[in-house]
Amino acid sequence: MDGGLILYCISLSMNKRKDVYVNSKVKKTAGLLFSLIIVCILAACGSNDSEGENTEGSTEQTNYSEAVDYTITGIEPGAGITVTTEKAIEQYDSLSGWELEQSSTAAMVTELEDAIANEEPIVVTGWNPHWMFAKFDNIKYLDDPKNVYGDVEVIKSLARKGLKEEKPNAYKLIDQFNWSVDDMEGIMYESSETGKDIAEVAKQWVKDNPDKVASWTEGVEDVDGVAIELVSTPWDSERASVNVVAEVLRQKGFEVTITPVDVAVVFEAIANGDADATLAAWMPMTHKDFYDEFKDDFVDMGPNLEGAKIGIVVPEYMDIDSIEDLQAK
């Protein structure tokens, strides 16, 4: 019953009772009772309104897809993860109508940092090793039930055909190069936090890790000015590895040139013999298309890093766990 109607009925009843003789004690008691009833009714009405508001708030869920304008914030066009994310948009019904915003790694990380600072929704492309996982401990990969991004990735070293015969010591050192996700991310994170160039941080890392470096140079003879060209992608992860290996090669007497290019050119340059080696082949998913195109024209030296990963990344405060939790446009 409406609270106003109840008050009206009670008031009407009390007015009728004026014609009935009651002593002052009864009148006083009735007045107190009337006041008590009013308080209870008002409290009940307020409680019901509050409960209705709380119920509505508890059932309301954020539409994260709409909040991010059905957009995945990505990196450079042509990057392996860019190509794979375009495939994910095609294969997942939950990503139907979505767009992949392609800009740069730096721009993507800046948008991620701003969103986290304001606890706003954001969906980005992500990969390990990358310093953002060291900087932000509250980001997570979304499950990929269709396995578009694959499981664990490795980063492989590739050499041009003939390198082993022509420059055996360079080949041996590159072939023996192997390190961890933590090693690579440590260099990237320090560069990000200090503002130092990755090449400078990598040089110091070589000085600080003599035992690991010794395992790469075992059986490698010193040379005198032998030229070697390493081709790599321009991203921080690959800049870390190529500068570490370049520093060790220089310590063995090699004259090293590092050439940063797009990923497609990396594979083409090794296959055509225009560069000696690369440390930047992400497999089995990220660079699969490029690898398959040129696989008969280079030497696969095997993984130099294991435990890499790529996928779609969101802040942990977003209450979703899978790509399929997103909504089509």
Image (cartoon, rainbow, N blue to C red):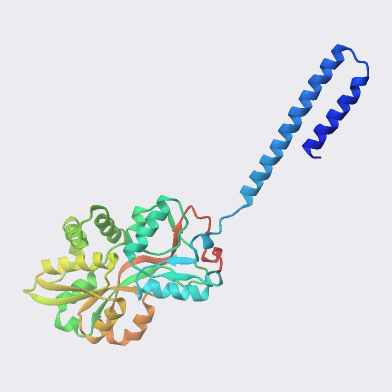
Q: Is there any visible trace of residue 320 in the rendered image? A: yes
Whether residue 251 sits left or right of residue 100 in the image: it is: left
Residue shown at the point (38%, 78%) measured from the top left: 288
- Up-down: is 2 above or below 203? above
Residue 41 lies in what quarter of the image? Answer: top right
* Residue nearer the viewer, 75 or 298: 75
Residue 42 lies in what quarter of the image? Answer: top right
- Up-down: is 235 above or below 41? below
The N terminus lies in quadrant: top right
Q: Residue furthest toward the right?
A: 20
Residue shown at the point (44%, 72%) measured from the top left: 85
Q: Is there any visible trace of residue 129 in the rendered image? A: no
Whether residue 202 sits left or right of residue 3 in the image: it is: left
Residue 250 lies, in percent from the top left, at 12, 68
Residue 311 lies, in percent from the top left, at 43, 66
Residue 99 lies, in percent from the top left, at 46, 71
- Up-down: is 154 above or below 300? above
* Residue nearer the viewer, 117 or 279: 117
The C terminus lies in quadrant: bottom right
Whether residue 113 sits left or right of residue 47 in the image: it is: left
